[in-house]
Every structure is written in structure tokens, then in C-alpha cells.
Amino acid sequence: MEKNSRIYVAGHRGLVGGAIERRLKAMGYENLITRTHKELDLTNQAAVFRFFEEEKPEYVVLAAAHVGGINANQTYPADFIYINSSIQCNVIKAAHDHKVKKLLFLGSSCIYPKLASQPMSEDALLTGPLETTNEAYAVAKIAGLEMCKFFKMQYGDDFISCMPTNLYGPGDNFNLESGHVMPALIRKFDDAKRKGDGSVTLWGTGKPMREFLYVDDMADACICLLEKYSGLQHVNIGTGKEISIKELAGLVKEIVGYEGEIRWDASMPDGTPRKLLNVDKLREIGFTEKVSLRDGIRRTYEWYLSQDEKDLKK
Ligand code: GFB
């Protein structure tokens, strides 16, 4: 990619897209193309094809998606499979038709079987049943990464995919119903501290293990793949380290400075017990994360405190 290459960052208002746009700008890429959801509905094929005709991007980062935490995935599976499949089909086909030089598709580590042996390597894909709470999203993301693979096989398009672990950081969705665990912990402990509540209720048992990557590290990993990787198989992006939700809650509680009790609502789902990624392939390509979990949580909390209430999708 040249500094004046026309790079379309789809999803630039989201957690990952926002970090990628920030990083590319900081690196001196001056020809970034972005559209808000209002400006371009990526589920509208004609609008997407018109956009590619007009803007002729040379590179595409497909970070736009309909995303959410365990509760949103479990509650709205039709939305998750339809919206994400539409976005992917439209953008990948338009990128092919307009001879985009390279496209990076972003998926999620929930694509792997619920009980895949841990850590999960790229070869674990499609070797067993999926976690039911996010099956719809996972099927859409599997279709997206397979579509990139088959466009590369049939047409030679340089379309690659990455499957990131759970991401967090500035720009995350702090809505308690639709968001993920990290922003939920930050918001719940901060609210309880301000109100002087004696306890905070979290979901499930706290036993599941999760892996977390700070979103600026994710942006660096994506740019590393854009610059160095053109293989057929997708690439896991993670840290190779995991923590229980219970331990994570203790860490966030300490960083926020909340001193009350933690309670667990076992009527809420735990989701998959573990989804630790094998990141050997990512290391071979030449990427290692820089931000530790503690430091990433501290930075995210500082960002959270600097935001207006209304901007946090409360
Ligand atoms: O981050 P999360 O919503 O999604 O939940 P997943 C992770 C774990 O945190 C689950 C627990 O075991 C939750 O029960 N948890 C505890 C909470 N308290 C809370 C809370 O207040 N809010 C939330 N949200 N969780 C998602 C997939 O799975 O991972 C998506 O559904 C995507 O499709 C994403 O793949 C990366 O990690 O379980």
C-alpha cells in the first residue's frame, strides 16, 4: 500500500474500524475512504456497487459488521446472520468486480467449534458443532472467510481473512444489553462506585475463560496482514493468553476502584467455556501485541471517563 493509495475502511465508526482508521492516518495514509451507515447501507447491493463505481477503492478493510455480546447474539440471531451475510456478499463481490488490489475481511473467534481443543488453530474450523449463543454470527463469518478463500482460488483475488479474539478499547459499545463483557464490567463498576451501590451483578457463573486483545493492537495486526500476508487460509489474531471472567471482574473492579460485592446471575448464559486462539501463524507473519490486559483496561476506563454519557450508546 502506498501512502496515497485509496483505502476504503468499511465500519470506521466501530470499535475496530475506528482503530484502523486512526492507525492508518497516524502512519500517513492520506487517501482513506469512509462512509457512515447513514451515508451507505452496506446491505443494499445497488448502493454498494454504485459506491465502488464512484470511489474505486484500491484496498478494502471490511470491518463493518452487525456485532454484539452474548445476549444480543442469543436474542437476535436472524439479524446477525442476515445483516452480516448481506454486507459481506455485497462488499466482497463489488471488490472483485472493481479489481480491488487487496481486501481484508474481519471475522471473529466464535467461528470455531464450541469444544475445539484449546488453543484453537486455524485448522479447527468446521470440525465440530458451534456455540449456540452465537451460531448465527459464526455461520455468517465462516461464509465470509470462505468466500474470500474461494474468490482467491477461482479468480486470484488477493482477499484475505483474519479471525480476532475478543476485542476491547476506546470506541467500544457500552450498552449493557448489546455490548460485550469488558465494557459492561467497566460501566457496571463505575456506575456502582458513583451511586455507592453495595453490589454489582454480573452474568453467568464467572467460570468461562476468555482472551482479550486491545483494539489498537488489533489495528496494528490488521495492517501487518495487509502488508505481509496473502495466504489462502485465515489468520487468528490474539494474544494466546486467557483469563476467567471472574478474575477479569476482579481486575476491572480494582482498576475502576469499586469496593462493593460481586454477585453472579446464573440465569444468564456463560456461552462457550473457552475460545483461546493459537497465534503461531500470526507470530510467524511477524506480529506480537504491545498492550497488556491491565494497561488496556486502564486506557479504556480513562477513555470511558472522558466521553459524554450520550456518546457511549447508553
Ligand atoms: O463478551 P460476551 O458478551 O461475549 O460475554 P462472548 C463473555 C462472557 O462474559 C460470558 C460473561 O460468559 C458472559 O456471561 N459476562 C458476565 C457478561 N457479565 C457480563 C455482562 O454484564 N455483560 C456481558 N456481555 N457478558 C461473543 C459472541 O461471545 O464474543 C460474539 O457472542 C463475538 O458473536 C464476541 O464473537 C467476540 O465472548 O461470550
Image: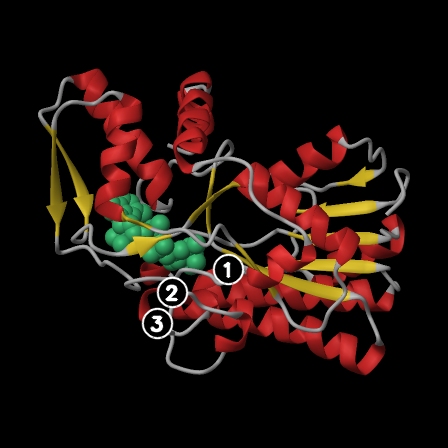
Name the residue: 40% across, 74% down: 113
Horizontally, residue 12 falls left or right of residue 93, namely left
Above or below, 191 relative to 229: above
Q: Front-most of 298 and 141?
A: 298
Q: Amino acid at mark 1?
A: Ser
Horizontally, residue 234 falls left or right of residue 72, namely right
Q: How is the image coloured?
A: secondary structure
- Residue 28 coordinates in the image, percent (x, y): 82, 31
Name the residue: 38% across, 62% down: 275
> Does dot 3 land on a helix, a strand or a loop?
loop
Q: Amino acid at mark 3?
A: Lys
Q: Is mark 2 within 8 Å of ligand 1?
A: yes
Name the residue: 88% across, 64% down: 99
Identify residue for label 1.
Answer: 108
Neighbourhood count class around disc 1 (C-alpha, 10 Å): few under 14, some 14–19, many 20 upward: some
Dot 1 or dot 2, earlier in sequence: 1
Which circle, 1 or 2, is nearer the viewer? 1
- Residue 223 coordinates in the image, percent (x, y): 71, 47
- State the mark number for residue 134: 2
* Separation of marks 1 and 2 at Cα, in angstroms: 10 Å
Q: Front-most of 50 and 106?
A: 106
Can I make out residue 107 in this image? yes
Q: Is mark 1 within 8 Å of ligand 1?
A: yes
Above or below, 184 relative to 40: above
Q: Front-most of 123 and 64?
A: 123
Identify residue for label 3.
Answer: 114
- Residue 29 coordinates in the image, percent (x, y): 82, 35
Dot 2 or dot 3, earlier in sequence: 3
- State the mark number for residue 42: none
